[in-house]
Image: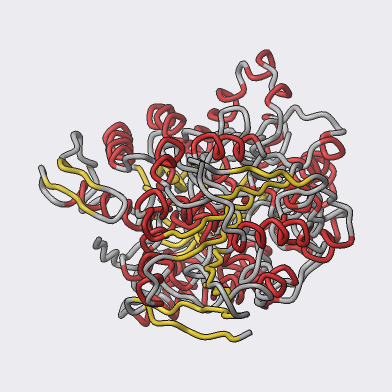
């Protein structure tokens, strides 16, 4: 964790199920919700979480700014239905880095006070290193938990209000909103960080979310896999909203996810991670970022009719998604998975730092069924040959362009 | 046919009026007039040939507003009491399909005196433990970039028919219709997504309160709301009669409009049908 005026770089893990057979894509319409858990193998599971946690623990030792987990249910894409449990383990195995849960899916909680309590525990267990992510969830979550998609957004913001109140108003207090009613809000323990842990919120560009995030002083995580031009547009849109609500923009307010594999040369990199990358795209992305199968991202009611209409008008039917790529040329065209030499990977990421003013780089090193050995090799090479350069060059850039690191005016 | 906007307690309700004679309120389903398409289907034209039918669009559907006020089925029931009041209706004959049938039943158990006759077609609202209502919200989502066969399967007895493919085509329909369908599923999702899914566990035992003549029509191959739930409705609704239509799925008014209209015509015209 650092307060220097430069980019922050995080190691991200999905913790997927890496043992699917080659015919998975032929046989199943989705990696989510209905994917039969008879494919799960107890023998192969033994040690798998430990392996994944080791990879993140090493990221802390290598000097990354943080590690990131998120929450998904009943799927092979990310076996983290309860990320706070895994983060609990990482509070003990890591020493310095931020611990980012991006995020807890608030509308799935019957009593969202629980999230305030768990994050407070994690903040205490980590001596103040937790980053509290809150997410409304999309179609997969709504189907998985029979949780109403159309009601998710109003519940989400009410839950955020409840949690911030639980952390900032001396208790006991009470809380009343349309969907929640708590007679006693008085959690023990309280988080260590003041006024409360940093809050990150993922979104896919809806204006309503941008305003809420900006106004409340939170950080925005652009949750769509996207190529440079669209990421730049999104960052510009967020920046204009931040300025519109009277704040000074800093790239530290916005993050984006990339998949990265670093090796000695571009050729070696593609060769070493190729199988894992295609495993990831064919299997792990099936059901949300792949045309084949049943995509459930656009569950009805997730957007207002106006936003849905705007989405339809801007969408290009038939355009390939990340999981549709069939060659490295197509992967490179998508601009979200970078495999190459340290220099190649630096150049790809630098485009987003320099050209889009995005300052939080979230890097997925474990991809699909990549082995622990390769994951660690790539992550280490990144830490030694890409990370220092990103830091020093962004420090120079920001000294000129963003001399003031954002003062987080956190308010509920 | 005439379309108008009615002011109901500060919200707009889009109404279609058609025909002359005995007034009937038609409460629409999720894939129906105002939802699958803006205007009436041939069934509604035919209905208007023997009665005066008024078809309001649910909140958030068509040009109707006020969806933010709706978060469960009771909200919809009370919304329609307000619509009755705004229309100056003391008591009405009602036809309800699917979701609309559920709304009508929830109203009728609360204020039975406001119903003259009640016809429910493939109505949601009741679910037996072994006759689950299917996941319309998931299977309204296409596969392989645009194939809608799962939804056709839920709505029609013959999912491969030209009718099924016309009402629920593969690929994207024009944006106005896509948004219309999205709005319909959004409204349905606000009242029926969460358990109990598209039904109310307390409704069955309350049906005894309904005093007016009632008719239940079900497609024998309704895979969205299995007909066993219609049997349960009939067992609890005093003096009601369940008629199953062979070769017909959930979308009775689209798949077997003539059979359905004959039954309705007899029900609304024939004074001989009285509660037993």
**Total labels drawn:** 0
Q: Residue B81, position in %: x, y?
A: 37, 65
Q: Position of residue A173 (x, y in %)?
A: 12, 47
The residue located at (78%, 51%) in the rendering is B156
Q: Which quadrant of the view contains residue B8?
A: bottom left
* Residue B163 falls left or right of residue A99: right
Question: Can residue B243 be seen at all in this image of the molecule?
Answer: yes
Residue drawn at x 60%, y 76% is: A310
Residue A12 in the image, given as x and y percentages of width and height: 56, 44
Please state if A138 lies on the left or on the right of A229 as rendered. left
Q: Is residue B45 above or below residue A13?
A: below
The residue lying toward the viewer, choosing from B258 and A100, is: B258
Image coordinates of residue B165 in percent, x first then y, are: 84, 61
Can residue A340 be seen? no
In-front residue for pair B241/A348: B241
Taking the view exactly as shown, the residue that stands out farthest to the top is: A43
Is B195 rendered above or below residue B71?
above
Q: Residue at x 64, y 34 (%)?
A: B228
Q: Which residue is situated farthest in the front direction here?
A: B272
Q: Please give left or right for residue B166 compared with residue B196 in the image.
A: right
**Res A209 quadrant in image:** bottom left
Q: How is the image coloured?
A: secondary structure
Tell me the quarter of the image containing the C terminus of chain A.
bottom left
Above or below B246: residue A45: above
Q: Where on the picture, by quarter, is residue A32?
A: top right
Q: Give above or below for B115 relative to A134.
A: below
Nearest to the observer: residue A146 or residue B192: B192
């Amino acid at each position: 964790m650092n307060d220097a005026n430069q980019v922050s770089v995080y190691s991200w893990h999905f913790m997927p199920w890496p043992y699917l057979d080659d015919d998975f894509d032929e046989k199943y319409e989705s990696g989510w919700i209905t994917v039969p858990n008879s494919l799960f193998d107890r023998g192969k599971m033994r040690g798998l979480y430990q392996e994944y946690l080791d990879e993140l623990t090493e990221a802390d030792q290598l000097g990354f700014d943080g590690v990131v987990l998120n929450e998904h249910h009943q799927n092979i894409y990310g076996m983290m239905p309860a990320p706070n449990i895994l983060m609990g383990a990482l509070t003990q195995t890591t020493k310095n880095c931020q611990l980012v849960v991006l995020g807890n899916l608030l509308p799935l909680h019957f009593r969202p006070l629980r999230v305030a309590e768990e994050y407070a525990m994690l903040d205490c267990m980590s001596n103040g290193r937790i980053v509290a992510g809150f997410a409304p969830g999309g179609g997969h979550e709504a189907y998985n938990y029979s949780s109403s998609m159309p009601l998710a957004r109003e519940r989400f913001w009410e839950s955020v209000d409840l949690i911030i109140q639980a952390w900032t108003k001396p208790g006991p207090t009470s809380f009343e909103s349309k969907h929640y009613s708590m007679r006693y809000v008085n959690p023990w323990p309280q988080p260590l960080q003041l006024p409360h842990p940093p809050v990150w919120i993922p979104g896919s560009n809806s204006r309503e979310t941008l305003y809420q995030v900006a106004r409340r002083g939170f950080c925005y995580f652009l949750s769509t896999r996207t190529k440079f031009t669209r990421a730049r547009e999104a960052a510009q849109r967020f920046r204009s909203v931040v300025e519109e609500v009277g704040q000074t923009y800093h790239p530290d307010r916005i993050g984006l996810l990339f998949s990265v594999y670093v090796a000695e040369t571009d050729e070696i990199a593609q060769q070493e991670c190729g199988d894992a990358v295609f495993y990831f795209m064919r299997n792990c992305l099936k059901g949300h970022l792949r045309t084949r199968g049943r995509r459930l991202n656009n569950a009805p009611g997730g957007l207002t009719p106006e936003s849905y209409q705007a989405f339809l008008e801007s969408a290009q039917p038939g355009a390939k998604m990340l999981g549709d790529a069939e060659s490295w040329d197509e992967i490179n065209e998508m601009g979200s998975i970078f495999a190459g030499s340290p220099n190649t990977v630096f150049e790809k990421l630098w485009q987003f730092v320099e050209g889009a003013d995005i300052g939080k780089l979230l890097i997925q090193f474990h991809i699909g069924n990549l082995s622990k050995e390769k994951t660690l090799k790539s992550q280490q090479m990144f830490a030694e040959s890409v990370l220092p350069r990103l830091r020093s060059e962004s420090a120079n850039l920001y000294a000129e362009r963003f001399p003031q690191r954002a003062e987080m005016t956190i308010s509920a | 046919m005439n379309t108008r906007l009615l002011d109901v307690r500060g919200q707009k309700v889009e109404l279609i009026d058609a025909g002359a004679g005995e007034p009937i309120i038609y409460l629409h389903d999720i894939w129906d007039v105002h939802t699958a398409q803006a205007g009436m289907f041939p069934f509604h034209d035919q209905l208007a040939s023997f009665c005066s039918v008024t078809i309001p669009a649910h909140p958030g559907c068509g040009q109707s507003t006020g969806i933010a006020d709706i978060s469960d089925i009771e909200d919809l029931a009370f919304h329609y009491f307000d619509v009755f009041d705004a229309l100056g209706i003391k008591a009405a004959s009602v036809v309800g399909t699917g979701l609309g049938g559920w709304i009508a039943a929830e109203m009728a158990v609360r204020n039975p005196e406001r119903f003259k006759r009640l016809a429910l077609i493939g109505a949601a609202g009741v679910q037996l433990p072994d006759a689950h209502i299917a996941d319309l919200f998931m299977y309204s989502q296409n596969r392989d970039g645009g194939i809608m066969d799962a939804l056709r399967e839920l709505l029609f007895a013959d999912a491969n028919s030209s009718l099924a493919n016309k009402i629920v085509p593969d690929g994207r329909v024009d944006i106005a219709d896509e948004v219309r369908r999205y709005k319909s599923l959004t409204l349905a999702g606000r009242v029926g997504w969460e358990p109990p899914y598209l039904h109310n566990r307390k409704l069955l035992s309350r049906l005894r309160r309904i005093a007016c003549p009632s008719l239940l029509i079900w497609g024998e191959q309704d895979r969205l709301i299995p007909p066993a739930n219609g049997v349960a409705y009939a067992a609890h609704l005093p003096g009601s009669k369940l008629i199953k239509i062979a070769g017909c799925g959930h979308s009775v008014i689209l798949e077997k409009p003539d059979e359905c209209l004959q039954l309705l015509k007899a029900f609304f015209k024939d004074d001989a049908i009285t509660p037993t």
